[in-house]
Image: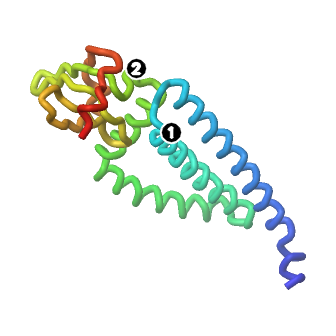
Amino acid sequence: MSNFFNTYQYEIISTLVLFFILLIIRTIIVVTVKKIGRRSGTTEARANLIGRYATVTLLLIALLIEAFILGFQTHDITLVFSSVFAVIGIALFAIWSILSNITSGIIMFFSFPYKVGDKIKIHDKDYPVEAIIEDIRAFQLILREDNGDLVTYPNNLILQKAVTLMEKDALDDSSIL
């Protein structure tokens, strides 16, 4: 057993250092996102979602760096990643609308001028919506119309349409059932 540790001492120490550095980076990102979320008045669930996206991204970066630490050659890693990305690319093309909604959700977290509780009007020529924002999720906004109807509106469409703020903080707690 001690022969194993002596043989792979550099790789073990490098892996531990990588793990520690990425853990610090992840903590900084998550704390920063939560501060931005509190300052902009978004829900904690949305901040946690962005934190999970950052964690997955850092995990993928860690796997790439770990492959180099363990001695994989660049052409081996290139072959594996090109094959994986080809499969992922085909799959992502099939679900592009889901990805565009997730990306829009991330953009909305940092720069969406409307918050939960605001009454907005979406200027859509086919189906104009005037409603109160009840929740902003990863894929869609949850809107409540004046007549009580619940409308889900995709995040990617909300960024493409003109939106008017009708009333700030219009959400009435008695209207939520």
Mark 2 element type: loop
Q: Name the image quarter holding the C terminus.
A: top left
Q: Is residue 13 left or right of residue 25?
A: right
Marking on residue 120: none
Q: Nearer the viewer, residue 58 or 32?
A: 32
Query: Where does residue 8 sit, x and y in percent of width and height?
Result: 83, 73
Where residue 102 sits in the image (x, y, percent)? 38, 42
163 over 136 or under it: above or below: above
| Residue at the image position 11 percent from the left and 27 percent from the top | 127
Picture quadrant where residue 67 is located: bottom right
Q: Who is closer to the viewer here, 167 or 12? A: 167
Residue appearing at x 50%, y 58% in the figure: 82
* Location of residue 167 by image quarter: top left
Q: Residue 80: give x, y in percent of width and height.
A: 54, 63
Question: Which residue ends up furthest to the left in the rendered image?
Answer: 126
Protein image colouring: rainbow
Q: Is residue 127 above or below residue 106?
A: above
Residue ranking furthest to the bottom: 1
For the residue pair 156 and 91, the one nearer the viewer reads as: 156
Q: Residues within 10 Å of mark 2 (few under 14, many from 20)?
A: few
Q: Quadrant of the N terminus?
A: bottom right
Residue drawn 30% across and 35% down?
141
Other residues around mark 1 within 10 Å, as few (<14) / some (14–19) / many (≥20): many
Q: Which mark is residue 47?
A: 1
Snapshot quadrant of residue 108:
top left
Q: Earlier in the sequence, mark 2 or mark 1?
A: 1
Q: How far is disc 2 from disc 1 in space, using C-alphas?
A: 16 Å
Q: Where residue 150 sits in the image (x, y, percent)?
A: 19, 37
Q: Which residue is mark 2?
A: 113
User: What's under tag 1, amino acid-wise?
Assistant: Ala
